[in-house]
Amino acid sequence: MKEIELSKIEGNNTRLATTDIGDLSKSFESYGQFSPIRVKKKLFTEGETYEVIFGNRRLATARALGWKTILADVVEASDSDALIMAFSENEDRANFTDYEKAILIERLHMISGKTYAEIAEMLGKSPSYMSQHVAMLHLFPEYETSEQERKIVLQQLTERHARALLKIEDPSERWIAAKLVVKCGMGVRELENMISRQSKRSSLDMSRSNSKEMIMQIIRSHIASMNSRDIASYFEPVSKNRFTKFSCYPPLSRLDSNSASEQLFHMLHELRDYEAAIESSELRVVGNFAYALMTLRNKYANSLKTVTAEMRLTIIFERDHHDWKIVHEHWSSATPTKFLSLFTK
């Protein structure tokens, strides 16, 4: 240990945050320097120069107070050894942010050529500690923002924040969430709750979107089955026990699945040609229920004449485990007299 001129000592760039020396400055003025900084000799330089291993705040305080020298331990150490010493000292003092620890681990990995598992053993940490901290370096893509902006945000996050943020798959949304954490001073639990709520909403939106696609496919197959006169296929998505139907074709009464099947058979039997095409549709999914409102352009033909009529169809669906079943249909014609004239004797 010896007194070294401040002009011969260079700080290191291990710390990213602006150094606050207010309290330390008061202590130095009142009591002097309690503990030495640690330095190593710089190689391949003219004269006797040193580089700080740890003690940047003490060095900055001495300079701010106008001291000419500072008490220092001089050690021989490689760049890797110096990083390990810096990590251990600041880990004990809880001085480093998690992001600074991540940068130091990455530098040690690059300088030493050792794996993260080997570095974990050197530092007395677990492999998961390594991966969780290093993951902070890859939390946000470079194209999202500038390096300086990323550093400012990452300096104020913990690795637990980072772990929670990694659950957000979209990098842009992850960056927005991280800035919100910093702006609001959000804790890890608050962040996890926010992500959980977003995830549930996204899952619900995805489920609703998938349900709509499934239901529209059922409707298209439903209409196609009528066009091809395949009554069995038409009633395949129908709930056998709960189905009801109101039809514009006699008998004009409430029908169940059996009577609706018989009615459709008789109607198609009386027609030489039948063709329905969906002109417009509106579909809503609400929980385990859905309803579709449609306008169809129908062409009917028997042995005497051909009629084109606009039909309105309402279909109500209910979710049955992973499937959707039709529980109600209501058919009506915009021109009922024109439509019924086909079936008048």
Image (spheres, rainbow, N blue to C red):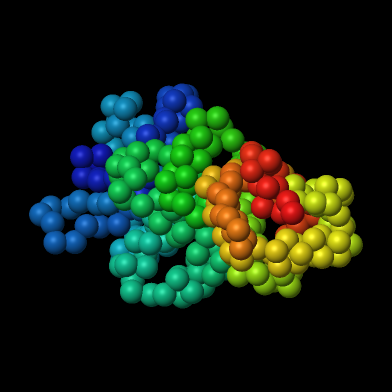
Looking at the image, the residue that sits furthest to the left is: 46
- Closer to the camera, 267 or 344? 344
Residue 167 in percent (x, y) is at: 56, 55
In this orientation, which residue lies closer to the viewer: 78 or 188?
188
In the image, residue 325 above or below residue 155: below
Quadrant in which the C terminus is drawn: bottom right
For the point 42% across and 46% down, the residue is 172
Task: Report x, y in % for residue 38.
Answer: 38, 51
The quarter of the picture where residue 78 lies is bottom left
Q: Position of residue 154 (x, y in %)?
A: 44, 44
Residue 13 seen? no
Tell me what residue is drawn at x 30 percent, y 57 percent. 40
Q: Position of residue 211 (x, y in %)?
A: 64, 56
Tell me what residue is drawn at x 55 percent, y 30 percent.
Answer: 184
In the shown orientation, is residue 75 left or right of residue 291? left
Q: Establish if 7 lies above or below 218.
A: above
Left or right: 156 as drawn, with respect to 320: left
Please give left or right for residue 345 compared with residue 274 in the image: right
